[in-house]
Image: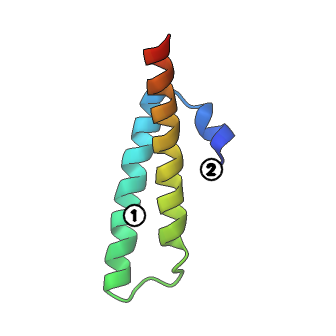
Amino acid sequence: MKAAEIRALSTEELGKQLESAHEELFNVRLRLSTKQLTNHREIPRLKKKIARIETILRERELSVRQA
C-alpha cells in the first residue's frame, strides 16, 4: 500500500490497518522462528507498512495541534 492510498483512509481505518499489520508481523515472525516462512522479504515489507501508517498518523496529530 502506497502513502497516497494510506492518506486517503480515515484515522479510524488507519488504526485498524496498523493493528492488523502488527498482528501479521507477529505471525510472520512466528513462522520464521518455526522455519515455515518461505519469503523472508515479508518482514521488511511489513515493517515499512507499519512505519508508513505511523508516520501518517503522526502527521495528522501534528497538523491538528498546529491548527
Task: Give the amino acid at mark 1.
Answer: Leu
Q: Quadrant of residue 27?
A: bottom left
Q: How is the image coloured?
A: rainbow
Picture coordinates of residue 49 (x, y %)?
A: 52, 54
- Whether residue 35 is situated above or below residue 13 in the rendered picture: below
As helix, strand or loop, the secondary structure at mark 1 comes to: helix
Q: Residue furthest bottom?
A: 35
Picture coordinates of residue 3 (x, y %)?
A: 64, 43
Q: Nearer the viewer, residue 37 or 41?
A: 41
Residue 1, label in figure = 2
Taking the image as shown, residue 54 lies to the left or right of residue 35, namely right
Picture coordinates of residue 56 (x, y %)?
A: 53, 36
**Rendered residue at 55%/75% (across/down):** 41
Count of numbered labels shown in the rendering = 2
As helix, strand or loop, the secondary structure at mark 2 comes to: loop
Taking the image as shown, residue 60 lies to the left or right of residue 8, namely left
Whichever of callouts 1 and 2 sits on the residue coming sooner in the sequence is 2
Q: Nearer the viewer, residue 16 or 53?
A: 53
Picture coordinates of residue 12 (x, y %)?
A: 42, 29
Q: Are marks 1 and 2 in contact (CB under 8 Å)?
A: no
**Rendered residue at 40%/40% (across/down):** 16
- Whether residue 3 is situated above or below residue 30 in the rendered picture: above
Task: Give the amino acid at mark 2.
Answer: Met
- Mark 2 Cα within 10 Å, few/some/many (few <14, many 20+)? few
For the residues labelled 1 and 2, the Cα–Cα distance comes to: 15 Å
- Mark 1 Cα within 10 Å, few/some/many (few <14, many 20+)? some
- Whether residue 41 is situated above or below residue 18 in the rendered picture: below
Q: Nearer the viewer, residue 31 or 58?
A: 58
Taking the image as shown, residue 38 lies to the left or right of residue 8, namely left
**Rendered residue at 51%/80% (across/down):** 40
Q: Residue furthest front?
A: 66
